[in-house]
Amino acid sequence: MAGLRLGPLLRYVDHESGSTATVWVEASRPCTVEVRCADGASGASPTFAVAGHHYALVVVEGLTPGTTTAYEVRIGSKRVWPPEDSRLPPSTITTPAVAGPSAGGGPGGAAGGGPGEDGPAPALRIAFGSCRWAAAPADGHDPAGPDALVTLAARLTADPAAERPDVLLLLGDQVYADETSGATRRRLAARRDLREPPGAEVADYEEYTCLYDESWRDPEVRWLLSTVPSCMIFDDHDVIDDWNTSAAWQEQIRATPWWHERIVSGLMSYWVYQHLGNLSPAELAADPLYATVRAVPDGTEALRRSAAGADADPARTRWSYQRIFGRVQLLMVDTRAARVLPEGRRAMLDDGEAAWLREKVLADPSAYDHILIGSSLPWLLPPLAHDAETWNAALCGGSRGGRWARFGEKVRRAADLEHWAAFPDSFARFTELLRRAGSGPEAPATVCVLSGDVHHAYIAEPRWPDTAPGGAPESRVLQLTCSPLHNSVPRSIRWAFRFGWSGVGRSIGRLLIRHGRTEPPPVSWSRTGGPWFGNQLMTLTLRGRNSALALVQAKSTFRNNLLVKVLERSLTKEP
């Protein structure tokens, strides 16, 4: 009899109809997985197979808009979720109320699917963060401190009436393929000799399944992901630290005998465990790879060919995607696999990806009160860090000759200089896109870039010069950075980040810009909040054209862990 190996994860909830959702599961054997809701809604799907594992993404239909309903997962006649001995609250699906014809505005009516003229729009709560090293402490002591997701889950299970996010954005490093725990290393050692490359890092698809199992099996996190919808995008550690830093990096790693299997397995597992759940039922139905994998007894080879092709030619696959929450548009952007790396042509996004982003951002300004762009890597860094990356990019591009270029490549890899600032042309184009998105009489109230990666949190706000073509935007444009969910940063790095915002740091940055013979950035910016260090989670609360931001940190007490609110601030632009 098949059982439930991992999940369920509640992924997509339709904010247009309020009647459809998707639930992801991994089963132990081939079977048909059924989701039954207390309100009568249901869905069922046979599993598909990849590398000896069995998965299903169940489309649940017939949900009642504006309600919360408990659900269970069944395989055959057996209920496999929730477990018989569970002490946690029921897993639920919450659907937005759907605006009627009287509601004004763009797709989905009022923000979050509100009731239009019959009352104020309900709040939409979007929690986000990144970088979650999921290893459980071996002896009760966790050197990374309390896990923000575990702590959030514990708070919600203790108080089912507490406000919970409408969606959870996981902005990269959901698993650490290059930094495994002791428990995972023991599992790897049972399969192969860890003295051979890639050593204690994961090598293939089966080993990736161990990482996801470790990351999502904690009982409280498992419950949280079963009841709060999630959107995900990868960052470097999902594959390897500093993935796609430069053409020289790529050439060197492709020459190693273990890399091809690593990158193919990383993209295969990402497609199965993360990417599929990002898509709507309509997008799934139109996806030829999904159709192929489901139509054959074993989809491994079809998925391998697709992953190998995506690595060889990133333009063949789009990992970025769009989600609409009433009058809120979310664009999750691939800033890793979509890069163009040869010097002289370096770009954060290839031409197709950049065109897709531009089209989505500028398509219908009046349709949205808020535009959110999920970029795992921050757009605005501390000024010294930004200038150092721009300087380094100029050196690597040959602005001071071959010797400096070789020195620059060594510095780039040693110091992880591979954010938006390390792709100066892309930074300038992205900055202009954000200005245009926020300009004009029908512009959204806010345009926010949501990021993680850098193991601290801060708020940065740009200022366009008076001479900027088109002028400053009417919208409030912000960089909101939150990381990590569960990791750490050395004290020396904390000091460096603080110094990067200082006046002295800015002066050093200007000297680097002059040495690199490059131009200063097209905007200036200031830190309007932070930096905050610790395991943490940001939540945006959007109601109509109003917006507010909260930052909570996971803290340890003598008796338990708790979330401590560090920031609560309105983001609404003053008239």
Image: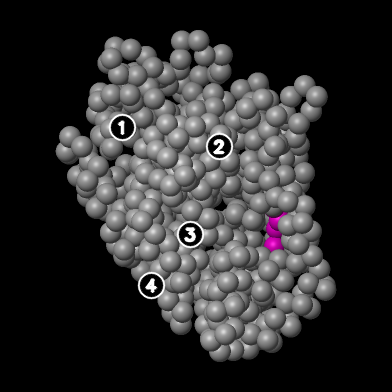
Does 356 appear above or below 301? below
Q: CA distance from mark 4 to mark 3?
A: 20 Å
Does 316 appear above or below 67? below
Query: Image quarter for residue 45?
Result: top left
Range of residues picked out in magenta: 457-461
Residue underneath mark 3: 243
SS type, badge 2 = loop
Number of the front mark, 4 or 1:
1
Name the amino acid, label 4: Asp
Q: CA distance from mark 4 to mark 1?
A: 36 Å
Whether residue 321 can be seen here: yes
Name the amino acid, label 3: Trp
Mark 4 in CB contact with mark 1 (< 8 angstroms): no
Which quadrant would the N terminus be assigned to in this image? top left
Query: Image quarter for residue 498?
Result: bottom right
Mark 3 in CB contact with mark 2 (< 8 angstroms): no
Location of residue 407 in the rendering, given as x and y in whole percent from the top left corner: 59, 78
Mark 3 in CB contact with mark 1 (< 8 angstroms): no
Seen from the viewer's position, the closer of residues 414 and 117 is 414
Identify the residue shown where x is 45% and y is 17%.
82
Residue underneath mark 2: 181
Sequence-earlier tag: 2 or 1: 1
Residue 351: mark in rendering: 4
Residue 53: mark in rendering: 1
Sequence-earlier tag: 4 or 3: 3
| Label 1 crowd (10 A; few <14 / some 14-19 / many >=20) | some
Name the amino acid, label 1: His
Sequence-earlier tag: 3 or 2: 2
Number of the front mark, 3 or 2:
2
| Label 4 crowd (10 A; few <14 / some 14-19 / many >=20) | some
SS type, badge 1 = strand
Number of the front mark, 4 or 3:
3
